[in-house]
Image (tube, rainbow, N blue to C red):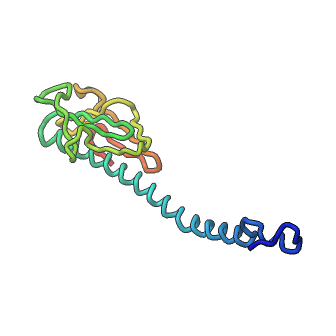
Amino acid sequence: MCASSTDRRHAGRCARGFTLAELVAVLVVLGVLAVAVMPRMDAALAMRNTGWHDQVLAALRQARSLAQGHRRLVCVTVATGSVTLAIASAHPASACTTALPGPDGGAAFAQDGSGIATTLTPAGTLYFQPSGRITSDGAGTAAVDASIGIDGEPDITTVGETGHVH
């Protein structure tokens, strides 16, 4: 019990709050936790980017395989958060008319909900020809070397004349 306000000798004992030693101890514990946890968070973010990179690479390789295996034009659209594939209904064709469902049955062949920045250079659609070439048009007149940039990952490149994706 606190002393009455008339007793000045014990008035400081009733003060509420934290001592300097307690505050320093809490700051030290928070610092140690930050040092231990932050590298793990960075590793988790890096794994997310690597996973998206691998999904995009797999989608492009699948497009090439489908175009050659089915002898049909396959169109690939790359955007931030999704890669979609479509296939022509007949051969020869200059446009893709049938969407190919992704592994989960959805519209996107590869999908990332966290919005990792993904850019295709040159912009537009990639057309995987039945011959194995990658072109900038459905008719297959202009082979295109393309680059897909993913935040924090090495670029994915395609070689238009050979259809190689790496």
In front here: 108 or 69? 108
In front here: 109 or 127? 109
Quadrant of res 159: top left
Quadrant of res 114: top left
In front here: 89 or 24? 24
Is 164 left, or right, of 38 in this rendering? left
Total marks placed: 0
Q: Position of residue 39 (x, y in %)?
A: 52, 63
Is 17 left, or right, of 78 in this rendering? right
Is 34 left, or right, of 1 in this rendering? left
Q: Residue at x 81, y 72 (%)?
A: 3
Q: Residue at x 36, y 53 (%)?
A: 51
Compared to 68, does 5 lie above or below? below
Is 129 left, or right, of 39 in this rendering? left
Q: Position of residue 124 (x, y in %)?
A: 35, 29
In front here: 36 or 99? 36
Q: Residue at x 89, y 71 (%)?
A: 8
Q: Position of residue 86 (x, y in %)?
A: 21, 34
Quadrant of res 13: bottom right
Q: Quadrant of the N terminus?
A: bottom right
Q: Position of residue 155 (x, y in %)?
A: 41, 46
